[in-house]
Image (cartoon, rainbow, N blue to C red):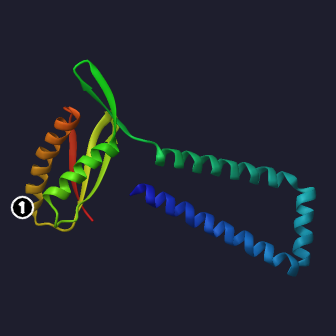
Amino acid sequence: MKNNVLLALVHVILLFLTFAVGVLFLCFPFAGSFSAHLAELILYKFQFFFYLGIVFLVMALILAFSFYSMHRKSFIRVKMNRLSYDVDVMVIEGYVKKYLKENYPKKKIGLEVFVLPKKKLEIALFVDTLKAVEKRHLLAKMEKEVGRLLFEYLSYTNDFFVTLNHK
């Protein structure tokens, strides 16, 4: 979800920047004195453009880092006997989605899997409004069943969290 917000923000910024540059170029033929002032600024006050270049480079680096962190894969390390291997959270998400489809075919339950600090796993479920009794029952059942799934398919025995959120 946070990825979509950042991506939407970047799209809006790029849209406005592109629009502003387009309007600027359209106005050049009709603004004679503005063109002369801009040419003077470019010729004699080039330090301004140096600092403007630094600002744009910093913004580009921040965007590049943001995109990198958005699309970086998340892994969880699983140890089994003497072997250890990394499991992509998308694999875990696939197992849990399959379980939800089989056991709750009529309910629309959203799902996101996160790797928290210290490599703890969080499975966030997004459901429509439920009664308090249904929430407790669903949460208890999901903790038990997801724990069984993680152990059965991946031999995952570490702690994990199941959280229940409203859409």
Indicate the position of residue 110 as horizontal and vertical percent values: 27, 60
- 146 to the left or right of 60: left
Is residue 164 or residue 71 the one in the foreground? 71
* Kind of residue sitting beneath label 1: Val
The quadrant the N terminus occupies is: bottom left
Q: Which one is in front, 158 or 50?
A: 158
Describe residue 16's horizontal placement relative to residue 122 as left or right: right
Extreme residue in the bottom direction: 30
Q: Position of residue 37 (x, y in %)?
A: 90, 69
In screen coordinates, is 5 left or right of 46? left
* Up-down relation of residue 48 to residue 156 (above or below): below
Instruction: Report the residue marked by disc 1.
Output: 133
Residue 134's image quarter? bottom left
Question: Which residue is more in the foreground, 167 or 87?
Answer: 87
Residue at the (39%, 40%) spot, across then down: 74
Q: Residue at x 46, y 43 (%)?
A: 72
Q: At 44% from the left edge and 55% from the top edge, which residue is drawn?
A: 3
Above or below — where is 57 with respect to 37? above
Q: How many marks?
A: 1
Q: Residue furthest top?
A: 82
Estimate the x, y position of residue 25 in percent, counting from the top left. Answer: 80, 72
Disc 1: CA contacts within 10 A as few (<14), some (14-19) or many (>=20)? few
Vertical placement of residue 113 versus 127, above or below: above
Q: Residue at x 16, y 56 (%)?
A: 102
- Determine the secondary structure under disc 1: helix
Pick the residue in front: 35 or 145. Answer: 145
Quarter of the picture holding the C terminus: bottom left
